[in-house]
Structure formats: C-alpha cells, structure tokens
Image (tube, coloured by chain):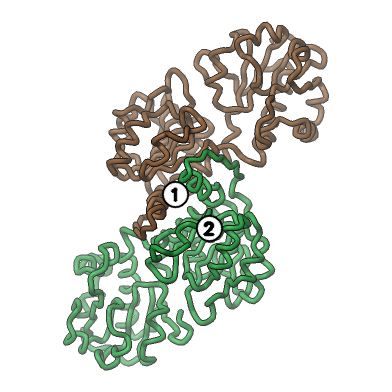
Chain colours: A green, B brown
Amino acid sequence: MPKPATRPLVYVADEPAPADAHAISPARIRQAARRHPGVFSRVRIVHGPDPKALAEAEIVLGVSFNAATLRQDAPKLRWIQSLNAGVEKLAPKLDRSFKLTNASGLHGPKGGEYGLAAMLLLNHAVQRFVGSQRRRAWEPVFTTPIEGKTVVIAGAGALGQAVALQAKRHRMTTIGINTSGRKAPGFDRVVKARDMAKVLPKADFLVVTLPITPGTENLIDRKAIGLLPDHCGIVNLGRAKVMDYDAMVERLRAGTLAGALLDVFSPEPLPADSPLWDVPNLIVSPHAGVDDGSVYVERGLDIFAANLKRYLAGRKLDNLVDLDKGY
Amino acid sequence: MPKPATRPLVYVADEPAPADAHAISPARIRQAARRHPGVFSRVRIVHGPDPKALAEAEIVLGVSFNAATLRQDAPKLRWIQSLNAGVEKLAPKLDRSFKLTNASGLHGPKGGEYGLAAMLLLNHAVQRFVGSQRRRAWEPVFTTPIEGKTVVIAGAGALGQAVALQAKRHRMTTIGINTSGRKAPGFDRVVKARDMAKVLPKADFLVVTLPITPGTENLIDRKAIGLLPDHCGIVNLGRAKVMDYDAMVERLRAGTLAGALLDVFSPEPLPADSPLWDVPNLIVSPHAGVDDGSVYVERGLDIFAANLKRYLAGRKLDNLVDLDKGY
C-alpha cells in the first residue's frame, strides 16, 4: 500500500445519527483516543455530513455514504472501516479499488452469551411457557439439564466461536460447520458445509451465525431443516436468508421442533402483518442479540484504532473483507 | 434409634398416580435396586393404596397419606422419606414421633441451570421482547453481558448453591442470604437475613430459593423489594409466600424493575383469572423450573437408597427435617 498522507483525513460517516447505542460520537472518539495514545493524534477527524471533507478523505469510518458514487465523491479514499460485522449490503456496491474492513469479533462477548441464553431458554421450555401464558394456561414441562447435549453451529467465525466457548462452559458438545472444515477455537469438531447432513441429525440445538453471501444464501434449506430431530431448538443470530424460514415454520406449526429464537429477519423491522409474530414456540428477537448496548461503539473504535496504527505503519489491515466473497 | 425389624416394610405412598415424571413406579424402584445392590433386597416394598400394609409399615416413601391420622393408621411407622425438597405442607401436621427426611439437593443440576437461564434471559431483555411480540412491535433493546454483574441469592441451601455455582461460571459476583450468615459453596459472601438491606441495593438480580417456613414467610417484604435497583431482575424458584408479590408487581407495572421470572405461586396452579398472567415484563413459569424431567424420581430414589442403608445400619439419616422449623 502506498504511504499515507501526513495526517490523513478520517471522515466519520455516521449520519443521520443512529440510536445512541450505535453513534460514533465525537465524545466516544475522544475516549478512544485516550485509550489508544499516539494513534488518533496522527490523523485529522471530520464528522459528516461534509461533502468537502469527504472529497479530501483518505479513510472513512462508518457506512453512511452513497456507495455507488463514493469513488467520485471521495477521489482520495483508500480505506473504509465499517463498525458492522455483516457488510452484505455494502460490499457488492463498492468500487474494487477500496479496501473495506469490518468489525468481525466485535459481537463476541454479548453475542456468545445471547446464543447461550437462547439455547438455555429453549432447552428449558420457556418458549412454551410464554405461549401458555398468553392463553393463561398452566402447562408445566419438565426438562433435563443442557449439560452433555450437542449444539451444531453453522458458521465457525468470531461469533460462532463465542457461542461455542459459552457452550463448552456448560459441557456441551460443539460441532461447527464452515467452508473449509478447518478447526476453530471452542469446537470439538468442524465439518465442511457440504457434509452438514452428517451432523444435523445430532443437533439438540442448531445455532446459525453465518453472514449472508452468495455461498451461504439458503444454505440451511428445506432438506437441511428436515434432518433436525424433533426435540431440536433453533437459534439464528446470523442473517435470515441463510435459512429457509418457511420450512422451519411448517415444522414449528406441526410441533415437530422444540422451538426457535430468531434475531434476524428479512425485511427488518419485521412488518406488523408478518405471520412470524404468531408462530407457536417461536420467539421474535428484534435484531438485538449481538450488539452490546454499552460498549458496541467503544469496541468498534478499538478495532479501528488497531487498524489505523497498522495503516499508518503501512502494514496489512485486520478484518479485511474480500469484496467478491462479501466477508 | 431402635433396631429396625427384620426386612421392615416400606410403604410407597404415591397415589393417586402423579404425572409420569413424578411417579414412584415399581419399574423405577426395580431400577434403583439394581443401582444400589444389597439395599432394597433387605426390605419388603408394598405400593399403596393398601391400608393393611400401611398398618404394618416401618417406613413410608412418598407423601400420599392423611398426615393428621398417620400415627393411628401406621402404628409401627418410624420414618417418612419425601421426594420433595419443600415439606411445608407436611411437616406441621405430622406427629412429632416421626422422622421426616426430604429430598433437598435433588433439584441442584436442573434448578441451578434454570436459575442461570432465567437471569440470562432477564439480562438480555427477552421478557421485553416477548411482550413486544404480543403487540407485533419491533422494539430492540441493546443489553450488556452478564459477566461481572451481581446476583443476590436469598437462600444458600442446596438450590441456592447450585444457582451460585452456575453464576460463577459466568464470573458473576454471588452474595447469599441465610439465617446464620455462614459461608456456603459458590458464594463470594453470605450475609444474615437481618442484614439484607445492605446487599439488596447491589442486586443486578435477586434469585429466591428459600423454602416457606415461619421464619421466611414474607421475608422479602415491601421494604426489601423497595431497596432493589430499577434495573434488577427477579427470579423466584423457592416459594411464593416468601415474597410480597403485590409490591413487586407495582414496581413492574411502574417500569421500575427490569423484569421477573416466577416459578412459584400461591395458589398453584395459578388461577386463570389471576392478574399475574398479564403483568408487563413478568414471565409465568408453571412450577417446572427445578424438577428434572428424566431423572427426578431416579435421583430421589438414590437419596432414599442411601438413607435406607443408613437406617438399616442404625445410623443417623441424611436430610432430616426439623419438624418445628419446617426444613
């Protein structure tokens, strides 16, 4: 990579201002600068909207810009740091001359816990109790501990690993599914996606943490869902289009799955007239499962600071996205 | 204790037959006999109802009898083994010449997990999501990990310890409340009940595992509930009358508590016209939180077998209940 300019301009593309939990505010950047001394002082930072500043920017932090015209709007731009882990909407539209880095790993601590929470509540029939509660019906279900049960995690990246590590705290068996079949931390074994039919019948729980890419769209299809045992509980923290929700809903309605907690939908927000709101034993979680309310942006800025240090030293960036693969 | 009769008669008081998960069936006793060779062969076992056998019984296993007339109905009876942990309905009615043992400890593995599951779901706002879902409303809440948060556990007995040990797996701070203030496994500290006002304001979660006794009735009263912080989540796995539910419900309706998962009510089943079914951020769990569906009776019979061995050897029984204290 060519040498960066002296005090390159970082354009913060964060408008219109999102909910406070996700705002890359000047105050948060000042705090990050204190956590990472000697890094932020080497760049100039301008908060958008400011088309003139964008035209001078070498680095963009955030994703509030017109991706289709960005090459023209920001002729000096080299690097975009997103604070999202999934960049499926952005990557296909970007000029191939840009480097895009994502915030993979940011969701680990909260997301891993949320995955465990979802499995535990499904294991202990809480999805049934909230359904009974709607009908004011006292319908006990006596369950067994989660210890020793098996979770199949589709996606063995940072989020999948965080869920697996939480599952290991409770002595579960963890089986990962990824493209390569390569072993990953927290997993007892990892199988290639094309071999998933071998492990899905063993799943007491299926947790999906996959991004949406051309390779993962509808990967958990009707056939895959048909292989899950009747007592299986499903959790989706990845992206909705990775799974065939229609096939899953048919089994939930038939009572041949234990339940599901879905955190992702297509489209979002889930429309008020969607049939998904009323499916038995399905809990609708409003895409809040993996973002940490207090430290989301802080962690994201830590990832940015580490990458900025690399950038200024002319080193390879972390979390670099393959713009063609989309992750 | 005087020497037991040669092959004393054990009367199984388990009628009318409860739900299968709780039945002390002949098949389960045969399995227990295989798990504990040389113990059950030294007694005669008769399943009730059988008034003649009851009149000859030295030992009663189970709680299906008329406690008020038991001294007359079973003149040779010395020892009653209950498979419940809470014996508040039985103990006050029993003749003081009987020895009563309970199944304290039986609920540990499942109950500890259920307590953790309840804390995790309250921590991650699932009680709010299921309320939003009823209204088909997309209302995300971004939460923070449970690691490092504080749980106050009222009751530091077997169930309380099981919850504390699960909480320590997630690096929570665990504070117990009991009568003596004596330290117990899993707890960072234990305070006396009369000092609980010092620790309740620190509670990110309050988990109640207390039995109901003259000493615990309304122990968590209106004043105690008033000391909990606004973000606190409440879990009750013990007995309903230990807490002032009215005071808790007022705070839930006012939005000044994060939520509650209650597994115990008075009376049970919770009547269909109870206002508790519709309290915001309250999850009604139908007294299913601590009983293990697959091994409840098996574990109970293991406790009985160990005690039976002690009885036949003339040794002191485990899990002996103080009939005046009620636990």
Circle 2 sits on which residue?
Answer: A260
Residue A176 percent across, percent down from the top left: 59, 67
Residue B55 percent across, percent down from the top left: 75, 10
Q: How far apart are marks 2 and 1 (CA)?
A: 17 Å
Which residue lies at the image location 24% right of the left edge and 90% below the top edge?
A: A73
Q: Hey, what amino acid is under mark 2?
A: Ala
Q: Which element type, helix, strand or loop, lies under badge 2?
A: strand
Circle 1 sits on which residue?
Answer: B120
Q: In this view, does B13 lie to the left or right of A122?
A: right
Q: Which element type, helix, strand or loop, lies under badge 1?
A: helix
Q: Hey, what amino acid is under mark 1?
A: Leu
Which residue lies at the image location 41% right of the left edge and 71% below the top edge?
A: A267
Q: Is residue A248 left or right of residue B207?
A: right
Quadrant where the N terminus of chain B sits is top right
Residue A209 percent across, percent down from the top left: 50, 67
| Residue B174 seen by the camera | no
